[in-house]
């Protein structure tokens, strides 16, 4: 039996990706691992393991014992949290990726997935329809670690044949778990406030446009990329990926059509500078051409879906 290990499974992305992987491969073949034992309790449908990706002996043992042949490495410190402790963010984000790439060689893994981000782009990057290949120069530790990570992925593919695949996600918006310290996370929090009937004070300015994506689209893109024939995956750093771009004012107006009494104010903090250094919108032509990427959700459709489904999930938070 060949198994798939998800590292950082209990987070915003992992919680939903693990569910879909379990449906596709069967829960017995999926191991959801995370540092946080309490958060693993939600995975009743697959195997679980409390695991620190930095504990190399424990990770090696699990891979050997469980015959792991694919890894989805999701554990990371995100953009806003990273700025509070840059050296720790660099160490976790970078050392863990290099370790996973080494494990892929050591255990002759079939495939590795590692997410990158729009945070690889910086203030000198073209802001509108940001191309796949262009100036990057990220200025957050998170962005620097993702850009370096992309270079390592391509290096391990070219030099050692490691089949590692990656996407530059935009801000991800899901309702099934709480976000973990990102600059785009206001777009998750805003729905919680609207449903609670509370005022929302946004940490970005009203007109800050950012690329975003609803979680079902992110899961679809991830699995489409991972299932694509090897020869179709022509970019081995990381693919640009896009769905929607909007400002805080635009998402607020959209929610207001469902909750007319909802109110918002704007108090930009240190995260404004991070958002200002990122693109407004992304050109993802290569993903669409190479492996047929197509998104399903726009702002209106995503908002209706979240407002319909979030209340039932709130009991879990
Ligand atoms: P998250 O913070 O919600 O989840 C990360 C998970 O990793 C948490 O459950 C945490 O407990 C776990 N973790 C932290 N340190 C660990 C360690 N040492 N060992 C094992 N587990 C550890 O993050 P997310 O939003 O789910 O993001 C997942 C990945 O996707 C990250 O690599 C992130 O950079 C990338 N990404 C996310 C977004 C987004 O908008 N959420 C956008 C672009 C890229
Ligand atoms: N959405 C993430 C963040 O804001 C970017 O990867 O940190």
Image (cartoon, rainbow, N blue to C red):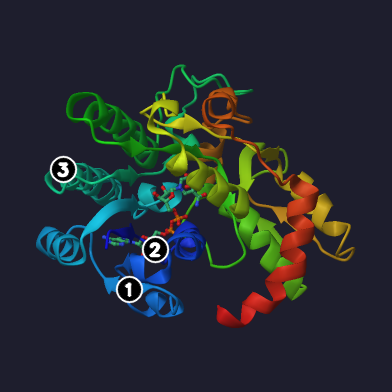
Say whether marks 1 and 3 touch (CB < 8 Å).
no
- The residue where tag 2 is placed is 9
Which residue is most to the left?
Answer: 57
Q: Is residue 270 visible?
A: no
- Quarter of the figure with residue 247: top right
Mark number for residue 48? 1
Q: Which element type, helix, strand or loop, lies under badge 2?
A: loop
Check mark 2 vs ligand 1: CB closer than 8 Å? yes or no.
yes
- Quarter of the figure with residue 195: bottom right
- Nearer the viewer's eye, disc 2 or disc 1? 1
Q: Position of residue 260 (x, y in %)?
A: 90, 63
User: Looking at the image, is 93 positioned above or below residue 54?
Assistant: above
**Cα distance in 3D space between marks 1 and 3:** 23 Å
Q: Position of residue 314 (x, y in %)?
A: 63, 77
- The residue where tag 3 is placed is 102
Q: Position of residue 157 (x, y in %)?
A: 26, 29
Q: Position of residue 58 (x, y in %)?
A: 14, 65
């Amino acid at each position: 039996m060949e198994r798939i290990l998800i590292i950082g499974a209990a987070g915003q992305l992992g919680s939903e990706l693990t569910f879909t992987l379990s449906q596709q491969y069967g829960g017995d073949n999926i191991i959801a691992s995370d540092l946080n034992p309490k958060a693993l309790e939600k995975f009743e449908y697959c195997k679980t393991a409390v695991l620190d990706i930095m504990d190399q002996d424990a990770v090696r043992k699990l891979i050997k014992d469980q015959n792991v042949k694919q890894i989805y490495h999701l554990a990371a410190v995100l953009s806003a949290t990273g700025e509070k402790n840059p050296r720790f963010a660099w160490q976790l984000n970078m050392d863990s990726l290099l370790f996973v790439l080494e494990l892929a060689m050591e255990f002759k893994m079939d495939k590795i997935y590692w997410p990158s981000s729009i945070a690889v782009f910086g203030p000198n990057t073209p802001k509108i329809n940001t191309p796949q290949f262009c100036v990057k120069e990220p200025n957050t530790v998170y962005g620097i670690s993702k850009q370096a990570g992309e270079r390592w992925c391509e290096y391990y593919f070219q030099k050692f044949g490691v089949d590692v695949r990656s996407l530059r996600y935009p801000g991800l918006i899901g309702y099934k778990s709480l976000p973990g310290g990102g600059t785009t996370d206001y777009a998750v929090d805003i729905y919680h406030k609207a449903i609670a009937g509370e005022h929302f004070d946004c940490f970005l300015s009203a007109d800050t446009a950012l690329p975003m994506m609803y979680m079902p689209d992110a899961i679809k893109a991830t699995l489409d990329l991972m299932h694509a024939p090897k020869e179709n995956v022509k970019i081995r750093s990381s693919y640009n990926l896009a769905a929607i771009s909007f400002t805080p004012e635009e998402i607020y107006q959209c929610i207001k059509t469902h909750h007319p009494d909802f109110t918002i104010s704007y108090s930009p903090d240190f995260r404004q500078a991070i958002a200002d250094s990122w693109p407004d919108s992304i050109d993802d032509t290569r993903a669409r051409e190479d492996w047929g990427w197509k998104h399903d959700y726009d702002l209106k459709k995503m908002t209706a879906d979240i407002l319909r489904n979030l209340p039932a999930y709130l009991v879990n938070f």
